[in-house]
Each structure stands twice: as structure tokens, then as C-alpha cells.
Amino acid sequence: MKFKYRAITKDGINQEGIIEAPNENEAIKTLHLRDLTVISCRSFEDIPLHQKEITLFERITSKDLVIFFRELATLIEGKVVITEALKSLIKQTKKKKLRDVVSQIAQDLEGGLAFSKALGKFKDLFPEFYISLVRSAEISGTLERTLIYIADYEEKKYETISKIKGALQYPIFVIGMTVVVGIVVMISVIPQLTSILLEAGAELPLATKILIWASNFLRRFWWLLVLGVIVFIAGFIYLYKNNIDFKRIIDKFLLKIPMFGEIIKEFYLERISDNLSTLLKGGITILKSLEVSADVTGNQIFKEILIESQEQIKAGKSISSVLQLHPEIPPMFVELVRVGETSGSLDEVLAKISKFYGKEVENVVQNITKLIEPFLVVIIGGGVAVMIMAVLLPIYNLAQAIK
């Protein structure tokens, strides 16, 4: 069971958080063992609904994690004990979900658990990549530096995603407005035009018949269309998350999209090389580094390549010999990895590869609107042209018949 408690530390500081225990007595006993004076301790079920914080729509974002790791690294750099640093962050954290997570981590540390193991309890929030880095830092005594790196990494990821979202806002807005205008025309204009043409007995071209059918369908069965879109999106997301074969097909398709496939490929190559470089520099073995990078890569094709590389290394082969068998990996990437393996400086070479692809991705993100504009012109122009032809052609035929 979960209990929400309020207590005072031996230093006289108010503290509140969540604790798990079989019953209330055990929860209070555990809190006493942590040198806390318990003010209140109540089961979640006993807390009135109006006193509970609503967290249904609350989500912990990359920005929240950036702030968390950055502030934690700053406090540790200032020689603050990690448990006290976490308690300080609990007071500053506004989101209840994150506050509960930090509170639980602080309690686990006070109970003698390692920081990496405490983070490992929240793998949906902290990926194995972070946990492995923290575990290595605990051994080498470089936790402060590692936390700063994680904050930098999360911040870079957040900024990249924000730039992509910002660049896509314009085309999404244009497409959205085009769809809205199209729906308004189909619902209000086309039916009036249809009645005029039918009364005049004009001969309707195929394009106009299709447009009229679509208009009638949209007016009568709009709810079916909305339901179909919702089911399609929900089904797609479910299959992508739960069906490996489906995910592999989609991820492979994304890498083969003209022009944009190369951009997506460079994004994943930058992520993979950066992750591997960081893990190797952190003293983690090549086998474990490949395993962790495979878990956080985000693309099934590259994940399988990394897993295969791990298996081949166990068999005595090199990473480059495996990478060169896959067309998704550019020859330059393979050659540089081979040089790194030969010279014994694989981590440094991977860092340079990451920097190269990082700049490529950044340049593309800055120009993504310009890349999408031609497609917008073709798609929107084509749709408008078809609609105009379907509307004007029967009117023209009707005018000719009157003459």
C-alpha cells in the first residue's frame, strides 16, 4: 500500500512524500528509522478526493528532466550530500508526479540503495542509458560530471525536438487550414451546386460525381469518418509499440522516404555514435554499450544492427565487419569505426562522428520548412486543381448547352 506522509527531519525541516508499506504501522516505523518525526501518515484510499492532487493529465517532459539533472548536478558540485540535494529538489519541484519520484529516490538512498538502482525503479522515466552512466560514475567517483552530461544530453535532445516541432508548425497549419476549408466547401458549397446542376439536367463528369458522392458521405456519415480516423491512429500506435514486425516495416519505410529518409538516418546515426562514445568513455564495456544503445536508439532497424554487432563481437569479429553488411550504415561511418577499432580510440572516433552528423541534422532542421514547401505546393495545388475542375467543368458544359 502507498501512504502519504508529512514529517520533520532531525534538522527541523518539514518533509512530505510517498512511502510503500504493508500497513500504516509499518510505514510509521520505517519513517522513524529514517530519523523522521511523523506528523501525519495516511493511506491514499483515506485521503478525501478534494485533497488529492489531480495528476491524470500531468506529464513529466524532457524539460523537467533537464532541470532536475542540472539542479542536482549543481547541488552536488556545491558539496551537498545527494540525499539532501534530492530533498531540496522536492521542495522546488512543482509537478506532483516528479515530486513523488524524487521523494521515492531520496527514501531509497536513505535506505541504503545505490542511486543507479533507485533510478532503475523508474525505467519508464530514466532509460537504461542514464542508469548505466550513473552506475559507472558511482564506481569511478564522477557522479557530478555524469549528471551534468546527462542534463546536457537531455537538453540537446529537447532543443532538437523543439526545433523540429517549430519548423513543422507552418506546414501543419497550412495543411490543417486546407483540410478545414475543403470540409466547409464539401458541406456547404457542393450541395448547393449539386442541386443547381441536377435541376438544369447537366451532364456530370466523373470527377464531379465523385465530389458529390464524397460530399453526401461527409454530411451523412461524418461521425463514421471521425471514428475511423481515431481507430486508425489508436491501432497504428498500439501496433507500433507492441508488434516488432510492424515496427520494423514502418521504421524501414521511414529510412527509405525520398530525401527525408536520409535526414532520419543521420538523426539515428548521430544518436547511436553519441551514446556509444559516452558509454565507452564512462568505462562501460563495448558489449554493454551496444546493448544499452540498442535499447535507446528508437529505431528497430538500427536496434537489430547493434544487437547483431554485439553477437558478432562475442564470436570474435569487429563492429565494422558487421556494420558494412547493412546498407543503412554509410561507408564513411563504417570506415571511421574501423579506424577507431584499429587505433584503440573508438570512443574518440565515435564522438567525432556524432559531432559531424549532429551538425548535419541541425542544418537540415533549420531548413526543414524550405524542404517541405515544394511538397505542400504540389499536394495543395493538386487538390485545389481537382476540386476546381470538378466544379467548373459541369458549369462550363451547362453554359455551352444554353448557347
Image (tube, grey):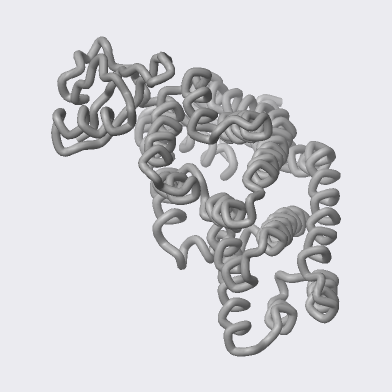
Counting from the top left corner in percent of width and height, residue 187 is at 49, 23
Q: Nearer the viewer, residue 397 or 143?
A: 143
Residue at image location 36% in from the left, 37% down from the top: 227
360 relative to 227 in the view: left or right: right
Residue 33 against residue 275 in the figure, above or below: above
Q: Tell me which residue sits at (54%, 21%) in the image.
A: 184
Whether residue 392 can be seen here: no
Percent x, y for residue 97?
A: 41, 28
> Can you tell which quarter of the image residue 313 is in?
bottom right
Whether residue 41 can be seen here: yes
Q: In the picture provided, is 162 more to the left or to the right than 230?
A: right
Find residue 218 and report its horizontal and vertical position in percent: 44, 31
Quadrant where the N terminus lies? top left
* Of 41 and 99, the residue lying toward us: 41
Question: Is 16 placed above or below 215 here?
Answer: above
In the foreground, 162 or 279? 279
